Amino acid sequence: GENVEQHPSTLSVQEGDSAVIKCTYSDSASNYFPWYKQELGKRPQLIIDIRSNVGEKKDQRIAVTLNKTAKHFSLHITETQPEDSAVYFCAAIPSGSARQLTFGSGTQLTVLP
Amino acid sequence: DSGVTQTPKHLITATGQRVTLRCSPRSGDLSVYWYQQSLDQGLQFLIQYYNGEERAKGNILERFSAQQFPDLHSELNLSSLELGDSALYFCASSPQVGGFSYGYTFGSGTRLTVV
């Protein structure tokens, strides 16, 4: 099955700086890569996603890049703000009929004022 | 409100007991997924249903079972509970198998505490 590895597990940045979180996946047939943000005690919320036929996608301060050859994708947050502090999860949907999301282990992002 | 409804929000029960967690998916979504999130842990996939049928199983214990009913709501049954079963249990739904177009929408979760 699919295996998604996520780095780093914790990340602290100064407010206004950029943050980058990286993930690798194992199933070369995976074709959908969402990112979720989870605040403490709350549900994961989809913040951005990318399909395998696209190399980059941007939504305001958030961008995701995908390198299918290397099987890795990254989340980029620019001009970070304290409200960006949360746990971020990457995920991938592998091939096969069930196609359930496999999540990375999460990154605790702390934006320091 | 995400449109995915989970009840109850909190549940405290004793070891050895049995509980049922309920999930109503977003209107129009046929797939329901259950995930377990222990303290400071990631999201562990338990089981998936699509239009009433089981589609995939993850790391679900034999003490756990689930079903999806004709109205598409789903229930996760946890029996012979142990302290280690304490966790947040999330339900998610998607409009089709794998939710290719929209990804998952998560409910607010049920926090289970086994004492």
Image (tube, coloured by chain):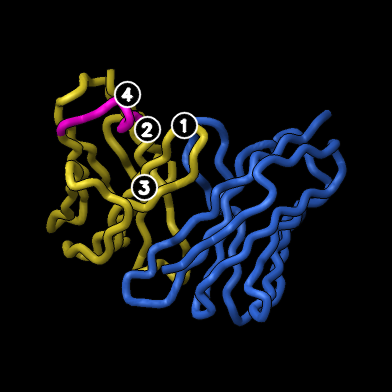
Chain colours: A blue, B yellow
Query: Residue at the spot x=77%, y=37% of the render?
Result: A12
Q: CA distance from mark 2 to mark 3?
A: 10 Å
Chain on which label 3 sits: B
Q: Amino acid at mark 1?
A: Leu
Q: CA distance from mark 2 to mark 1?
A: 7 Å
Residue matched to label 4 = B113
Same-chain status of marks 4 and 2 = yes
Q: CA distance from mark 1 to mark 3?
A: 13 Å
For marks 4 and 2 on the same chain, the one whose residue lies earlier in the sequence: 2
Q: Residues within 10 Å of mark 1 (few under 14, many from 20)?
A: few
Magenta-drawn segment: B80-87
Is residue A63 or residue B37 the one in the foreground? B37
Q: Are marks 2 and 1 in contact (CB under 8 Å)?
A: yes
Q: Secondary structure at mark 1?
A: loop
Chain on which label 1 sits: B
Residue matched to label 2 = B87
Is residue B85 or residue A82 the one in the foreground? B85
Chain on which label 2 sits: B
Q: Secondary structure at mark 3?
A: strand
For marks 4 and 1 on the same chain, the one whose residue lies earlier in the sequence: 1
Query: Residue at the spot x=80%, y=31% of the render?
Result: A112
Is residue A1 among the parts visible in the rendering?
A: yes
Does A32 sit above or below residue A61? below
Q: Amino acid at mark 4?
A: Thr
State yes or no: residue B64 in magenta: no
Residue matched to label 3 = B35
Q: Which mark is residue B39?
A: 1
Does A8 sit above or below residue B38? below
Q: Amino acid at mark 2?
A: Ala
